[in-house]
Amino acid sequence: MYNEKIFLTPQEILEKEFKVDAKGYRPQEVDKFLDMVIRDYTEFMSIIKKLQNDNRVLAEDNAKIKAEYRKLKAVIDSANDSAGGRGNNFNNIDLLKRISNLEKIVYGKEE
């Protein structure tokens, strides 16, 4: 994924040789700087691998959750269809009203 966009590896940076001119840079400073670049590259590559792994795990979890959602939706749709074909969605208020009406009938409570 990112490998196409990264041109250098830490090893390539480490092994890079520069030509020295009379008015060139100080080799020690260049080496010190390149060592820092190598550490950064190594850390970036480690982070990329971790993020790719995390991404793969999350994609798998997402697929599992989507499958579970489809399964539960099918169960709910099936339950709604078997409830007289009316497709009613009963919520807690509807259930409490039904219980209240049944209690009135059973216990003879009149309002």
Image: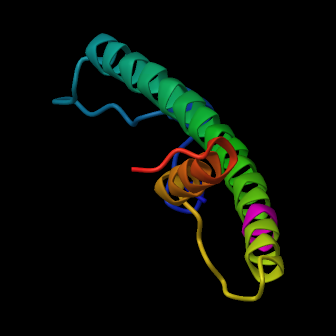
Out of 60 and 20, give the one closest to the viewer.
Answer: 60
Out of 4 and 63, give the one closest to the viewer.
Answer: 63
In which quadrant will I find the N terminus?
bottom right
Q: Is residue 26 left or right of residue 82?
A: left
In the image, residue 61 sits, relative to residue 81, either above or below, namely: above
In the image, residue 91 sits, relative to residue 19, either above or below, namely: below
Colour treatment of the image: rainbow
> Residue 56: where, in percent of width, then height?
70, 48
> Among all residues in the image, which is located at the extreme left?
23
Q: Is residue 27 left or right of residue 67?
A: left
Secondary structure character of the magenta stretch overall: helix
The span picked out in magenta is: 70-74
Q: Quadrant of residue 31?
A: top left
> Can residue 32 be found in the magenta stretch?
no
| Residue at 27% over, 14% down | 29
Q: Is residue 80 left or right of residue 33?
A: right
> Among all residues in the image, which is located at the extreme bottom?
85
In the image, residue 64 sits, relative to residue 30, either above or below, namely: below
> Residue 85: where, in percent of width, then height?
75, 88
Q: Is residue 88 left or right of residue 57?
A: left
Out of 24 and 70, give the one closest to the viewer.
Answer: 70
| Residue at 62% over, 32% down | 50
- Can residue 60 be seen in the rendering of this structure? yes
In the image, residue 13 sits, relative to residue 64, either above or below, namely: above
| Residue at 57% over, 55% down | 101
Q: Quadrant of residue 9?
A: top right
> Residue 4: where, in percent of width, then height?
57, 62
- Can residue 15 be seen in the rendering of this structure? no
Q: How many marks?
A: 0
> Residue 77: where, in percent of width, then height?
74, 76
